[in-house]
Image (cartoon, rainbow, N blue to C red):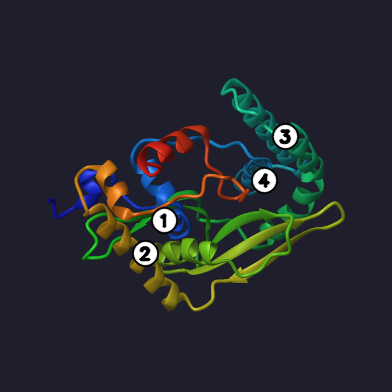
Amino acid sequence: MSNNPFDVHGVKYLSPNSINKFKQNPAKWLTNIAGYTDRLYIPAFTNGNAIEAGLTHAIMNGASIAESTDVAMEEYQRIRTEAKDAGFNYDLDGCNKKQLRAPDILATVIPKYRAFGVPVAMQKWVEWEWEDLPIPVRGIIDLEYEDCVRDLKTTSVKPKNNDNYNRQLTIYALATDKVPYIDYVYSTTKIAELQTFEIPDINEHIKDVKRIAMKMMRLLSLSDDIEEVCYLSCLDPNLSNDNWYDQWGHNEVRGAKKLFIK
């Protein structure tokens, strides 16, 4: 048995997404490790990517709100085309409804971000290492400033404390030694506003992130064979897709049935 079970199973680093996925759904994480993955096209994710593309253009290139809105619209179209080419049954109506709000959202958010000043970096890879974890934890920061890091989230549900985001920003804080903030772009049919939260209890989240990472390592150490790891895990995944935020793709369902439903 290797001293680095991550390496045996082809895992070169952990990410905020993988740590949160393991916390929420370890069977899906193992299914992905086994090579069964899907790219999911969901209007809420498309909206976040488009708003971020427009905002980045405004902040980093000094573009006008109108020019930045055009960039966002191009991103909506790019993802729609990509989903169609992939044969994905994409919710076009849902995407179109969110796209209609994009001009108002960007007109609200861009001036607020310009008030923060010019970031020192955007979409920057960072990493953190623990001595007793054989691989690093890596992530991509949305925005880094001289004194803080910020991550942009889009939502149509009133923002509240979210442990997944807390863990994500904790990793960024460890990697940069800067204060972490979550910026929620909160929008409904009538509202578009920016709500900012500093991560609470950062030391507790550090313990939580490391605890989860060590559990990931211990699970993979059960065997050098990922199918045997899945068998020994005794996990029984729910493949119903009743949770819209934690959807199983076609390949993931196929893999999970092979790995766990025996």
Instruction: Give the quadrant of residue 221.
Output: bottom left
What is the three-letter code of the residue carrying label 3?
A: Met
Q: Earlier in the sequence, mark 4 or mark 2?
A: 4
Side (left or right) of 145 relative to 138? right
What is the three-letter code of the residue carrying label 2?
A: Ile
Screen quadrant of the C terminus: top left
| Residue 94, position as x, y percentages in the image | 75, 39
Side (left or right) of 5 relative to 262? left
Q: Residue at x 74, y 32 (%)?
A: 92
Nearer to me, 92 or 146: 92
Of the numbered discs in the image, which one, if any, rests on residue 212?
A: 2
Q: Residue at x 72, y 60 (%)?
A: 112
Q: Residue furthest left?
A: 1
What is the three-letter code of the residue carrying label 4?
A: Ala
**Element type at mark 3:** helix
Residue underneath mark 4: 44
Q: Earlier in the sequence, mark 3 or mark 4?
A: 4
Residue underneath mark 3: 73
Q: Earlier in the sequence, mark 1 or mark 2?
A: 1
Depth check, mark 3 against mark 2: the one in front is: 2
Q: Residue at x 42, y 77 (%)?
A: 203
Of the numbered discs in the image, which one, if any, rests on residue 22?
A: 1
Q: Earlier in the sequence, mark 3 or mark 2?
A: 3
Q: Earlier in the sequence, mark 3 or mark 1?
A: 1
Tag 4–tag 2 contact (CB < 8 Å): no
What is the three-letter code of the residue carrying label 1?
A: Phe
Tag 1–tag 2 contact (CB < 8 Å): yes
**Element type at mark 1:** helix
Q: Using the numbered discs, state the Cα–Cα distance from disc 3 to disc 1 in whole angstroms.
A: 34 Å
